[in-house]
Structures are given as C-alpha cells and as structure tokens.
Amino acid sequence: MSDNNRVQGFLSAVAGNWVSRLYLAATLGLLIWAMADHAFVTHQDASFAAVVPLLATAPTSLLTLLLPEGAPAALFFAVIATAAVVNAALLGALTQRLLGRPVRA
C-alpha cells in the first residue's frame, strides 16, 4: 500500500462517516469552551473546564499525565486535539467494520 493510500485511508476513517464527524464536532466544541474559560474567565480557585474535554477524549488523552508539571496550556490543548483525531479514526474504522463497508483508500 502506498503512502498516499494510507493517508487517504486514515482521513476516510477520521471524517468519512457521521459518527466520527459528530465526535470531532462535539470534542471541538468542548475544547473551544475550555480554551475560552482558560483565556477569558478569572477564577479564585482552580477551574475544572479542561477536565471535560480530557474525559471526552479518554483513553488517548491520558497521555497528558506524562506532561511535565507547569507545561504550557497550548501543549495540553494540542495533546487533547491529537487524542480527538486518534479516537475519531478508531471510531470511524470501527463504524466502517460494523456496517460491513471496507475501509476505503
């Protein structure tokens, strides 16, 4: 299989069905909400807004536990976004298998 076919197959799994697209849209909304809370809302105490996208992208997002203490928020959000894409690919591949459609390149 050529590299071009692998990329097309991955992109098909990530956004080639409604399950993956719905998951990505929901995760993007949660991520935007957490970023807005981090940037624009001042808190006396800690905010748990970032926990919601973390849980929505688990188990892949648990890699954030490996980040060093005091890591920049942008790195945290990048790991969450990457986890969402990986989970969407897994959901897309599973959906294609369950519906009996081959994973197309």
Image (cartoon, helix red, strand yellow):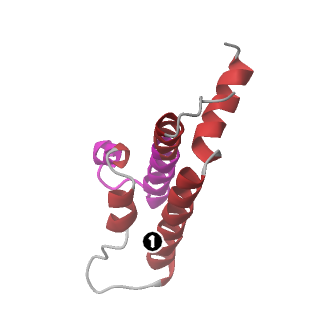
Q: State the quadrant of the N terminus.
A: top right
Q: Residue at (69%, 18%) from the top-left corner?
A: 3
* Relative image position of residue 52 (x, y in whole percent): 35, 67
Estimate the x, y position of residue 33 in percent, counting from the top left. Answer: 49, 74
Residue 64 falls inside the magenta stretch: yes
Magenta: main secondary structure: helix
In this view, the residue farthest toward the top is: 1
Q: Does dot 1 land on a helix, a strand or a loop? A: helix
Magenta residues, start to end? 62-87
- Place of residue 28 in the rendered image (x, y in percent of width and height, measured from the top left): 54, 63
Residue at coordinates 44% horizontally, 53% vertically from top-left? 80
User: Left or right: where does residue 40 sit relative to residue 53?
Assistant: right
Residue for badge 1: 34
Q: Quadrant of the C terminus?
A: top right
Front one among 20 and 46: 20
On the rendered structure, is 40 left or right of 21? Answer: left
* Residue for point 25% across, 82% down: 45
Q: Eyeballing the image, is 2 above or below 15?
A: above
